[in-house]
Amino acid sequence: MKNLVFFLLLVIFVTCPARPLTGLAVVGPLTQTAFSCLYSSGYDIPIVRVYTVSGSYGVDPNADRTMINAYQANPYALYGYM
């Protein structure tokens, strides 16, 4: 069974083409239109700040709306960083 799983994973990784992705760190609120503009400019992945240390420690107040806007513009991939 382990050999079969290994073989299938090997086939998937060898036959699936990989391409580099371009990401952009987002610190602050962006609209869905702004994300659409970024995607059309060649960026693939928004990386949204979800935790802030400026002022008071905690969740970035803009993170939820920014992530929703990014997802609505292109639900391909979305990352957050702390």
Image: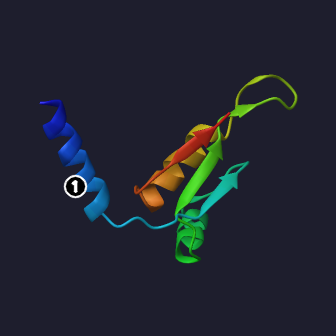
**Quarter of the image where one finds residue 62:** top right
The residue that disc 1 covers is 11
Q: Please say which color scheme the image uses.
A: rainbow
Query: Is 79 located above or below residue 11 in the figure?
Result: above
Q: In terms of depth relative to the viewer, which is nearer, 42 or 19?
A: 19
**Quarter of the image where one finds residue 2:** top left
Q: Can you give x and y, in whole percent of width and height, for residue 21 in the image? A: 53, 64
Q: Is residue 41 left or right of residue 27?
A: left
The residue at the point 40 percent across, 64 percent down is: 18
Question: Please, what is the three-letter code of the amino acid marked with disc 1?
Answer: Val
Q: In terms of depth relative to the viewer, which is nearer, 67 or 6?
A: 6
Q: Looking at this rendering, what residue extends furthest in the bottom direction?
A: 41
Q: Can you give x and y, in whole percent of width and height, for residue 4 in the image? A: 13, 39
Q: Is residue 82 left or right of residue 7?
A: right
The residue at the point 50 percent across, 49 percent down is: 78
Query: Is 42 located above or below residue 66 in the figure?
Result: below
Q: In terms of depth relative to the viewer, which is nearer, 44 or 33?
A: 44
Query: Is 6 located above or below residue 23 in the figure?
Result: above
Secondary structure of the residue carrying tag 1 is: helix
Quarter of the rendering occupied by the C terminus: top right
The residue at the point 61 percent across, 49 percent down is: 47
Q: In terms of depth relative to the viewer, which is nearer, 59 or 8?
A: 8
Quarter of the rendering occupied by the N terminus: top left
Q: Can you give x and y, in whole percent of width and height, for residue 37 in the image? A: 58, 72
Q: Is residue 78 left or right of residue 18?
A: right
